[in-house]
Amino acid sequence: MKSVIALALVGSAAAFAPSTRGPVAPPKLMYVPCISTDDLPAPGSATSGVAGGLAICIAVDQKGAVYALGDKCPPVNQPLSFGKVNTDGTISDPVLGTKFSLKTGEVVSWCPSGLGLLVGGLFDPVGVPTYPVKAKGKVVEVQVDVNYKANFEANYWSGVLDAQGKANGKYY
């Protein structure tokens, strides 16, 4: 009887264990459309877009140079596109005040504001990814790994209680 209970517990635990399938496809860098050139923000501001399934912040500095960065500010994932583009070549997190380099995405100043000092002190400084960007016709294109989203999601658990209803992640 004890062995039956032990097997039932192990079987139950295995059903809820995370999947470790690994990458679905190798990285593949491509320029993909993000926003229309008509939607480019005015110099000194930023907007958001999506490229290859990734949230992208498109920032324009005061001289008109265009930059593409990840749109999630560490440590609380506030959209970077809500931030302020500064004259010193940085963009500021709108909530905690962290400044990120427009060119490299590296942290220039980590959580300097009041709330930022509280929250930022709990985390190590982390930058944001940057992406090559170019205009092609009436579209702003960003170079991203088009397989990144699929590879990231490959590690999600998938099974009997899959959120989409089927063990293979497809809808009915």
Image (tube, rainbow, N blue to C red):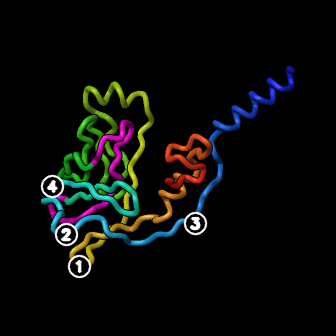
* Left or right of residue 35: residue 72: right
Along the viewing direction, whichever of 20 and 107 lies nearer the viewer: 20
Mark 4 against mark 3, which lies toward the viewer?
3
Question: How crowded is the residue under tag 1: few (<14 C-alpha within 10 Å), some, or many (20+)?
Answer: few
Report the residue marked by disc 4. 44
The image quarter in which residue 30 lies: bottom left
Residue at image point 64% right, 36% down: 16
* Circle on res. 26: 3
* Left or right of residue 81: residue 76: right
Report the residue marked by disc 2. 37
* Left or right of residue 19: residue 120: left
| Residue 102 in the image: above or below residue 123 | below
Along the viewing direction, whichever of 127 and 18 lies nearer the viewer: 18
Percent across and percent down for residue 56 are 32, 56
Q: Secondary structure at mark 3?
A: loop
Q: Amino acid at mark 1?
A: Gly
Q: Amino acid at mark 4?
A: Gly
Q: Are discs 1 and 2 less than 8 Å apart at CB?
A: yes
Q: Which residues are magenta?
A: 61-80
